[in-house]
Image (cartoon, helix red, strand yellow):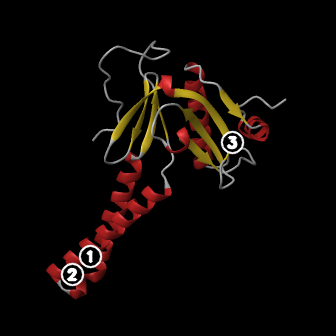
Amino acid sequence: MSDDVPPVSGPDISRRSRGPVRAVRAGVVTGRRTLTYSALAVLSVLVICGAVVALFGVNRIFTGLLAGAVAGIALLVALFGRDVVVLTDRAIYRRTPWAESRLEWDRVVAGRFALDERARWSLALDLTGGDEPHDELVLLSIPPVRRPVSNAYEHRKREQVAEIRRILREQRIPVTVLPEIAAALHEHWKLAPAAR
């Protein structure tokens, strides 16, 4: 399976449809899916280790563990890499390793950048008419920004925030940002205007 944006057939119903389709990857993997993916990885380690020991004897247990660990890590990378939300100019695609669904921009009421229940900054879209929990789609969850970008993770998250803000602005989706979040993004990451 490819992570490229699938071709869209039918009339273009986007609010903006000029130029090539641009895609922004976002999304937060839920705790339940993380537990499922981890259990699958552990199961793959056990199955491969058991197969190596059954085929070559108990003296190959470390070889089996190593081969199982490599397979488990590869499985985790594949599962987490496929679990994503892709925002394009035409629609929003929610992907998991087993399914994909399309969400039209017309269902998006607004966006908000606020604190979540774990005191992390959460960028979410408020939706209408769907089966999403709490009628929202969480795009990003990051620890609070307290300093300028200092590592690759922070750089990637800064880029993601900028890309998501750009596509929401192009789609004319209003975004509410808490004043302390706006001030920190402006001061440290040079992104949002300072709160007034």
Residue 14: mark in rendering? none
Residue 9 percent coordinates (x, y): 29, 20
Please name the amino acid that badge 3 sits on: Ala
- In what quadrant of the picture does the C terminus appear? top right
Question: In percent of the image, x 50 and y 27: which residue is there?
Answer: 107
Q: CA distance from mark 1 to mark 3?
A: 45 Å
The residue most toward the left is 55
Helix, strand or loop under label 1: helix
Asked whether the viewer can see residue 136, the reply is: no
Name the quadrant containing residue 113. top right
Residue 49: mark in rendering? 1
Of the pair 186 and 180, the residue shown nearer to us: 180
Residue 62 percent coordinates (x, y): 31, 80
Please name the amino acid that badge 2 sits on: Val
Q: CA distance from mark 2 to mark 3?
A: 51 Å
Q: Is residue 160 left or right of residue 175?
A: left
Residue 82 percent coordinates (x, y): 37, 46
- In what quadrant of the picture does the N terminus appear? top left
Asked whether the viewer can see residue 2, the reply is: yes
The residue most toward the bottom is 58
Helix, strand or loop under label 2: helix
User: Label 3: which residue?
Assistant: 114
Category of crowding for the residue at label 3, using alpha-carbon neighbours closer than 10 angstroms: few (below 14), some (14–19), many (at least 20): many
Please name the amino acid that badge 1 sits on: Cys
Q: CA distance from mark 2 to mark 1?
A: 6 Å
Of callouts 1 and 3, the N-terminal one: 1
Category of crowding for the residue at label 1, using alpha-carbon neighbours closer than 10 angstroms: few (below 14), some (14–19), many (at least 20): many
Residue 53: mark in rendering? 2
Question: In percent of the image, x 43 and y 22: which residue is there?
Answer: 90
How many numbered marks does the figure carry?
3
